[in-house]
Amino acid sequence: MTPNDNSILASLYDSIPDTSSTCEKCSDCCGVVPFVETEASNAEAWTGKRPHLNGISCGYLSDHKCTIYEIRPFMCRLMGAADIIQCEKKRKNGCNPPLTREQASHLVKMYRQVGGPMVFPTLDDFIQAAKT
Ligand code: SF4
Ligand code: SF4
């Protein structure tokens, strides 16, 4: 992690249009979500836990609410904002994905250049399970 990673990530987060007004907050999209290492470290500092699963749900989900909402990772923010990661419920509520495919691909490409390797909760869970 470089000291600059969080500011670059913050800038990328700011580049994703806010589509929360059309979100039904059903948490159906809170399953296996990838983090980059910086995001995983931020979540660990916030909660004491690395990205993990609780059954088939993201481990940061509690009572249908995201417990790390302020620092949720890039992919959670992108949900419904681009046609490469659409949400039918948001679309039904009037959200036509505001980012074009090209814009979203560009943001994802930039995202993959910061924050270190991807961290997948399932992989982390497998590793933890293998240690016990
Ligand atoms: S983005 Fe879609 S699936 Fe996720 S909580 Fe909102 S309405 Fe539900
Ligand atoms: S980090 Fe939050 S928004 Fe993202 S999948 Fe987990 S509970 Fe859902």
Image (spheres, helix red, strand yellow):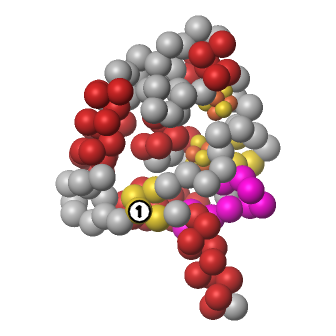
How far across and down, in percent of the image, does residue 37 sit?
Answer: 39, 64
Q: Where are the magenta residues, as a range?
A: 48-58
**Position above or below: 106 against 83:** below
Residue 78 in view, yes or no: yes
| Quadrant into which the C terminus falls | bottom right
Name the residue: 75% across, 40% down: 64
Could you classify mark 1 by the number of other residues whose Cα lies within 10 Å: few (under 14), some (14-19), or many (20 or more)? some
| Quadrant into which the N terminus falls | bottom left
Which is more toward the observer, 96 or 8? 96
**Position above or below: 43 against 21:** below
Does residue 49 show up magenta in the picture?
yes
**Position above or below: 110 against 127:** above
- Taking the image as shown, residue 60 lies to the left or right of residue 86, namely right
Does residue 125 show up magenta in the picture?
no
How far across and down, in percent of the image, does residue 88 sit?
Answer: 64, 23
Name the residue: 24% across, 45% down: 110
How many numbered discs, if any? 1
User: Where, by quadrant of the figure, is residue 93 drawn?
Assistant: top right
Name the residue: 72% across, 53% down: 57
